[in-house]
Image (cartoon, helix red, strand yellow):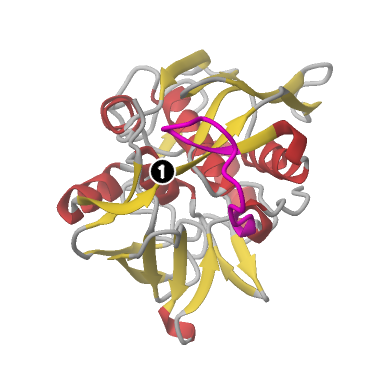
């Protein structure tokens, strides 16, 4: 059963590392925050400029989910957001002194360790949920596979449940599917250690695009044409698990814990954030509720529910 009260962390936690795409070294610090703060990044290299982890701050997404506010950018937020969101942390400041969240080992495991060190504290304020009332589906053609469709949908439910399906034409990947109720325990044991991955053939083109400048065999699985360059894998279906991890991190941009079922079929960051955008843009699809009543909360602040910008 979801918690009735909002939470934050008990103490600060720190980490540092290189950004996957920019190659820029940065330091992050998790800091306790008061009730109704939400998840807020602070660029401490820019006078603590705040960037809320909310749909209306989504920048262009392709190979990672980035946020932008008033021209200030923060890249590759999804792994950290997935950990925070899955752990039920409602209010937290994330101080960072660079343009990109460190990739660390390519998974959410190091962020989970930070959160475990930080601990969880209940606050004296009722938790608010985004409860989905009507289905919403988004689909697009799969550019790499003519005639096939990528899609994602969100549906009413009394808990946060997700199903994520991937299909890559590779002997180690193929069709993989993860279905689970999202909780601190399930995320910790099923998804947190799953690492990001890329294909060896894509490395040079991505670098020509100015991406994966910080990528290495220490922070990403690299797939050759018929195997893996830097095994062993942590799970036989590590690729599907990591895509599910990414999905949760992107859904965190809804701004409140979800009471919904999400199904993603070969989707990616673009479709994930389009779903969040379209959901928040139509208030007939959802209500804000508390665990205690499951009824709409009157006069609830809607700042966290601004629609995301259209994503490419």
Which residue is at a point 15% across and 53% down the rendered structure image? 117
Q: Please tell me whether mark 1 sits on a helix, a strand or a loop.
A: helix
In the image, residue 8 above or below residue 267: below
Q: Quadrant of the N terminus?
A: top left
Magenta span has 294?
yes
Most extreme residue toward the bottom, as rendered?
47
User: Does residue 113 appear in the picture of this structure?
Assistant: yes
User: Does residue 171 appear in the picture of this structure?
Assistant: no
**Residue that carries the numbered disc 1 in the rendered image:** 85
Magenta span has 310?
no
The stretch of residues the image draws in magenta is: 288-304
Compare residues 238 and 284 and report the one nearer the observer. Answer: 284
In the image, residue 214 above or below residue 63: below
Rendering coords of residue 151 (x, y %): 71, 24
Rendering coords of residue 64 (x, y %): 57, 49
Which residue is at a point 65% across and 56% down the rendered structure image? 58
Q: Is residue 83 left or right of residue 303?
A: left
Which residue is at a point 59% across and 50% down the rendered structure image? 204
Rendering coords of residue 268 (x, y %): 63, 35
In the image, residue 97 above or below residue 10: below
Rendering coords of residue 98 (x, y %): 44, 74
Q: Is residue 38 left or right of residue 118?
A: right
Q: Main secondary structure of the magenta part?
A: loop
Q: Quadrant of residue 192?
A: top left
Count of numbered marks: 1
Compare residues 65 and 260 and report the one nearer the observer. Answer: 260
What is the crowding at mark 1: few (fewer than 14 residues within 10 Å), some, or many (at least 20)?
many
In the image, residue 132 above or below residue 38: above
Which residue is at a point 50% across and 21% down the rendered structure image? 158
């Amino acid at each position: 059963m979801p918690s009735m009260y909002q939470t934050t962390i008990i103490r600060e936690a720190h980490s540092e590392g290189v950004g996957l795409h920019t190659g820029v070294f940065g330091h992050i610090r998790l800091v306790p925050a008061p009730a109704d703060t939400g998840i807020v990044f602070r660029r401490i290299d820019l006078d603590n400029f705040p960037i809320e982890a909310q749909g209306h701050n989504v920048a262009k997404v392709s190979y990672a989910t980035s946020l932008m506010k008033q021209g200030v950018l923060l890249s590759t937020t999804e792994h950290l957001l997935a950990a925070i969101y899955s752990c039920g942390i409602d209010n937290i400041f994330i101080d960072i002194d660079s343009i990109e969240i460190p990739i660390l080992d390519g998974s959410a495991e190091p962020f989970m360790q930070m959160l475990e060190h930080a601990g969880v504290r209940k606050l004296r304020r009722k938790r608010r949920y985004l409860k989905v009332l009507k289905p919403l589906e988004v689909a697009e053609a799969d550019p790499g596979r003519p005639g096939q469709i990528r899609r994602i949908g969100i549906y009413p439910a009394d808990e946060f449940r997700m199903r994520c399906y991937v299909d890559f034409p590779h002997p180690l990947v193929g069709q993989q599917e993860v279905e689970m109720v999202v909780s601190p325990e399930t995320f910790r044991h099923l998804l947190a250690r799953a690492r990001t991955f890329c294909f060896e053939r894509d490395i040079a083109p991505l670098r020509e695009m100015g991406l994966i400048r910080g990528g290495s065999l220490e922070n990403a699985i690299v797939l050759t044409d018929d195997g893996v360059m830097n095994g062993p894998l942590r799970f036989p279906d590590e690729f599907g698990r990591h895509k599910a991890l990414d999905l949760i991190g992107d859904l965190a941009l809804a701004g409140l814990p979800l009471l919904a079922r999400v199904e993603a079929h070969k989707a990616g960051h673009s479709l994930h954030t389009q779903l969040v955008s379209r959901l928040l843009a139509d208030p007939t699809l959802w209500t804000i509720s508390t665990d205690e009543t499951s009824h709409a909360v009157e006069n609830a602040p809607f700042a966290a529910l601004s629609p995301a910008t259209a994503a490419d």
